[in-house]
Image: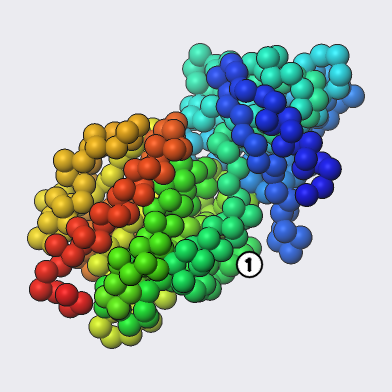
Amino acid sequence: MGRRTRLWNMFAALVAGGAGAAVFAQAPDSPPARFSKPALTGCHTVQGSVHFDFEGASRSTCYVEDERTISIMVVPEHLPPINPSPWYAFRYKAAEGAKLTVNVRYLGVRHRYAPKWYGRGDPASLSVAVAKDGGGIAITLPPGEGVVSGQPLVTSAHYAKLQEQLLQAGNGSTTLLGHSHDGRPVEAVHLGNADAPRLVILLGRQHPPEVTGATAMDAFSLTIAKLVRSGAIDRNRYQFLIVPLLNPDGVARGHWRANLGGVDLNRDWGAFTQPETRAVVDWIRRRPAGVRPVLMLDFHSTNRNLFYVQGDEASPQGKTFLEAWLNGKETAFNGYPFEIEPRDANPGSGTTKNWFHATYGIPAFTYEAGDNTDPAAIRNAAEALATTMIPALDSSLRGAPGQ
Ligand SMILES: [Zn+2]
């Protein structure tokens, strides 16, 4: 740990947040040298500067308004954006003696993520104002330096660590599924025996800013790994493909929705025009005869805790599984009330959920954690739901192979 990192951590521990912002304690990672870096370097005056030169930084343009005011424009990777989730992340420096104001403006969409700040300086002088029309925010920052982002930065270093934890906890193996446009690995952790007949697929981070979904997936998959290792889940009957970071380019490059091909990966299932989605489906299609997907969960974030599930179109097995796993549990978890929303499969839309259901006739759910749900509550609920998932699957698959 270098001197710089120690400083970051110390100041992060000193500040307690304020003015609608939250504080987090993780220093931004530098992009690995072998991958392309953001081309935009930022804006500066004598009094202050903003930069977009780290992993997860947004692809924003900036301009100087005056010595102490810099504006940044947040634009989607493709138009029109499917939902308003403008992502911003920048590093700043402000000279002693006065504050720096950064105006964050969104092209054509409304504000979603309250800024998360960590840095050096007096946290009491941090303030955030959301424009009346929701078209942007003004963040006034104390003298010093720091990082501001729409959600905590959860980038490749996090996933390297998670992968290690999953391998240790579950006695599994790493599987290289393919590569992204930028050459980043699309990796999975595989748990259970390769010829176990029932395959459960867990996917995450198709949409880069949705880090509360990642919190849920981390806890969920670590719990599964421990259950496999302890024998509570029978590795001869169940195997798991866990892909926590399906859009590594989008996360590294600070996209708000798409991969580097400019495609929303959660609309590419069926067409499989993108290397990331193809990597997953190719692996599934190469499974030995007798191995079959039985459940797919795709982790995301939205404005509340929610499961998108099959409705009337669900198979009898899918209905039994939903009944056993989620129905009646909507208020069972402290701090994590959730809704269950059946969405009729629309074969044209290319969502992961719809493709898995249409192709395999299995339950395929979108697991949405709320943008602002407490992380501890997200983890507790995810651990509990991971623990009850296999018993619920067992009850729905009675008489099927692997019983
Ligand atoms: Zn999403």
Residue 166 appears in the rendering: yes
Tell me: residue 171, above or below residue 110. Answer: below
Question: How packed is label 1: few (under 14 Cα within 10 Å), some, or many (20 or more)?
Answer: some
Residue in the picture at 32% in, 33% down: 334
Q: Toward which corner of the image does residue 48 lie, by quadrant?
A: top right
**Nearest to the observer: residue 48 or residue 396:** 396
- Secondary structure at numbered mark 1: loop
Q: Residue furthest front?
A: 230
Amino acid under label 1?
Answer: Gly
Residue 280 appears in the rendering: no
| Residue 353 coordinates in the image, percent (x, y) | 30, 56
Residue in the picture at 67% in, 24% down: 15
Q: Which residue is label 1 attached to? A: 183
Q: Quadrant of the C terminus?
A: bottom left
Q: Is residue 98 left or right of residue 239?
A: right
Q: How many marks?
A: 1
Q: Residue furthest right?
A: 46
Q: Is residue 243 left or right of residue 19?
A: left
| Residue 209 coordinates in the image, percent (x, y) | 52, 42
Tell me: residue 53, above or below residue 370. Answer: below
| Residue 328 coordinates in the image, percent (x, y) | 16, 40
| Residue 153 coordinates in the image, percent (x, y) | 60, 42
Disc 1 beta carbon < 8 A from ligand 1?
Answer: no
**Nearest to the observer: residue 9 or residue 278:** 9
Residue in the picture at 24% in, 34% down: 331
Q: Toward which corner of the image does residue 237 lie, by quadrant?
A: bottom left
Tell me: residue 80, above or below residue 225. Answer: above
